[in-house]
Image: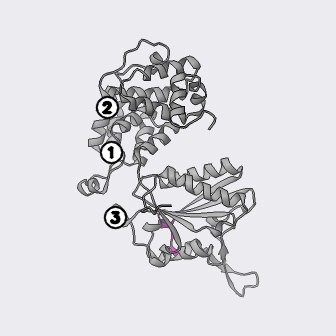
Amino acid sequence: MKAQSKKDMTVEEIKNVLSKVYVELIENDIPFKKFPSVMLWGSPGVGKSQGVKQIAKDIEVKTGKKVVVTDVRLLLFNPVDLRGIPTSNAEKTLAVWLKPQIFQMDESKEVVNILFLDEISAAPPSVQAAAYQITLDRVIGEHKIPDNCIIIAAGNRVSDKSVAYKMPKALANRLLHLDVCVDSSAWLSWATENGINSIVTSFLAYQPTALNAGNDILDENDSNSFPTPRSWEMVSNILNILNGDLDVAYPLLCGCVGSNIANELILWAEVFNRIPLPEEICTMTNIGVPVRLEAIYATVFSLIEYLKKHNSESEVFNAIKYVSKIPQMEFKHNFFSFIYKMKEVRRVAAKVDEFNSWMVNNGLYEDD
């Protein structure tokens, strides 16, 4: 195999790799301690915590075991907090340490625990030092981490313009390090499957660079509000709660992603509100296709959102026929890519010639 340089990984890529490793360990009855504890590095809001939840869900689906995630924010702890509270033994002759509640885990074979040490790089060096035992020896003080526990840590890098201490080399050498990057297409795939508002998804499909503020932007921006995958999820929640009332939502959107991006989103929403309604497209075949690119983006993503809940044969058929009229092939490909990931829609779409041809051309099949 040809040597490759190290690359950053998306949350989806990390989820796929780690869940595969953990499932292999479980199915072959190999102790988790045989695989190193993992450290996820990435800027604020890129989805590190979300990725751990996705790993847990993946393990549950593939193994049938219950997965319990214990989220420990090390920034909030002192070293002694991790060890527990000292008390006397029954004979009043020795001091013993009461186990902290966070380490009280179900040790049965039908359960997998994930101990998630979040914000580890923001914790003072003394607390990071206390994490040495946890990550390598799987103990803290007198207490042993259960054998059915996976250990994953996460934090921001010093270069991410966030609160972060340089990790001591002794701790760093105990961890397997993965750098998390933001990939707009991967995030949009996740977003369409998790109820993110279609105004947000269509806007970010049209302007993918708005998904995440880079360090250059943060250097120039004194505002506490800036775009990240996490803040876009907040924007989506606000729009869903307010049923798209932009006048009321505007100052709240500024408070999530900053005024410049919020203004662009408002302008985009005005375009979005003038496109053909998806229910009209899915019940008729004579609706015209927009000419402006931004309107096409908005139309395609409104259709994707609509088909999550409305996927009768006639609706899916008409949606596919409509998108096939768009002259720019990228829209057809993106549309088919999204509905392929929506299993209920895919089963219906597989009966349509255009979609079947696309699957064959891309080496995909309906029963994958």
Q: Which residue is mark 2?
A: 268
**Coloration of the structure image:** one colour
Q: Nearer the viewer, residue 69 or 4?
A: 4
What range is drawn magenta here?
A: 73-79
Farthest residue, direction front: 1
Label 3 CA crowd tier, 10 Å (few <14, some 14–19, many 20+): few
Q: Secondary structure at mark 1?
A: helix
Res. 243 in view: no
- Cα separation, mark 2 vs mark 1, equals 15 Å
Q: Which residue is mark 1?
A: 209
Residue type pointed to by label 2:
Trp
Residue 302 vs 217, above or below: the answer is above
Residue at point 65%, 60% (across, down): 113
Q: Nearer the viewer, residue 329 or 34?
A: 329
Q: Secondary structure at mark 3?
A: helix
Task: Say whether marks 2 and 1 touch (CB < 8 Å).
Answer: no
Rendered location of residue 366, percent (x, y): 60, 33
Say which label, 1 or 3, has the lower sequence index: 3
Q: Nearer the viewer, residue 111 or 190?
A: 190
Residue type pointed to by label 3:
Ser
Quadrant of the image containing the C terminus = top right
Residue 82 vs 321, above or below: the answer is below
Q: Which residue is mark 3?
A: 159
- Cα separation, mark 2 vs mark 3, equals 32 Å
Residue 321 vs 19, above or below: the answer is above
Residue 15 vs 143, above or below: the answer is above
Image depth: mark 2 or mark 1 in front? 1
Rendered location of residue 194, percent (x, y): 52, 39
Label 1 CA crowd tier, 10 Å (few <14, some 14–19, many 20+): few
Residue 349 placement: quadrant = top right
